[in-house]
Image (cartoon, grey):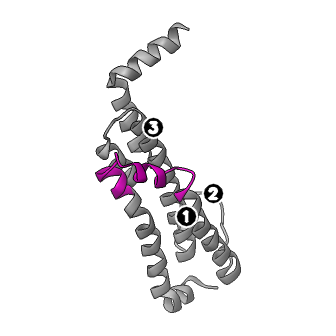
Amino acid sequence: MPVWVVELFGNQQLNRAFWLVNGSVAPFWILMMLIPDKKWVRRICHPFFVPALLSCFYLYLVYVLMTTTGVPPLAGLEVRAMRRFIDHPIVFLVIWAHYMTVDLFLGMTIYQHAARRRLWIPGELLLCWLFGPAGLVAYMIRLSFHRSTRIAIRRAILK
């Protein structure tokens, strides 16, 4: 199905799906940043719980792409061909859902690690939400300055 047909007849549904993806991850990011020390937040913000649920929506979008519109042809592995491929609105939604799910998994993993060390890391989590791996790098830098981590690294090296 041509892209213009998908956009013409499905624009509202595409926007709704885009905001559903964004809206489904936002509450968890906000909870982890604002009230990280609550026990119930630590329970629901587990990296193998929420991202797994969001993966179901991701798989549904892949199903819609395969059955409704068909996967658009990928003409080569150059940047121009990839940009044309991603221009398809449902392919973009699939990639966006993938990005949001993986970033949330990474953020929740960082959050759980920081919670065990009693660290409050809203800046690192915000970076992870917006820029993915940049939040991981910021957290790793923060850990390198944390006293207990330096001690643990020294112990691991000396063994």
| Residue lying farthest to the top in this orientation | 158
Q: Earlier in the sequence, mark 3 or mark 2?
A: 2
In the drawing, what numbered circle is on residue 7? none
Quarter containing the N terminus: bottom right
In the drawing, what numbered circle is on residue 54? 1
Q: Quadrant of residue 20?
A: bottom left
Residue 28 in the magenta stretch? The answer is: no
On the image, the x and y values in percent for residue 74 come to 65, 67
| Residue lying farthest to the bottom in this orientation | 9
Toward the viewer: 133 or 31? 31
Q: Is residue 11 above or below residue 43?
A: below
**Alpha-carbon distance for marks 3 and 2?**
37 Å
In the drawing, what numbered circle is on residue 113? 3
Q: Secondary structure at mark 3?
A: helix
Q: Is residue 84 visible?
A: no
Report the number of numbered marks: 3
Label 2 belongs to which residue? Answer: 77
On the image, the x and y values in percent for residue 125 come to 36, 47
On the image, the x and y values in percent for residue 12 come to 45, 87
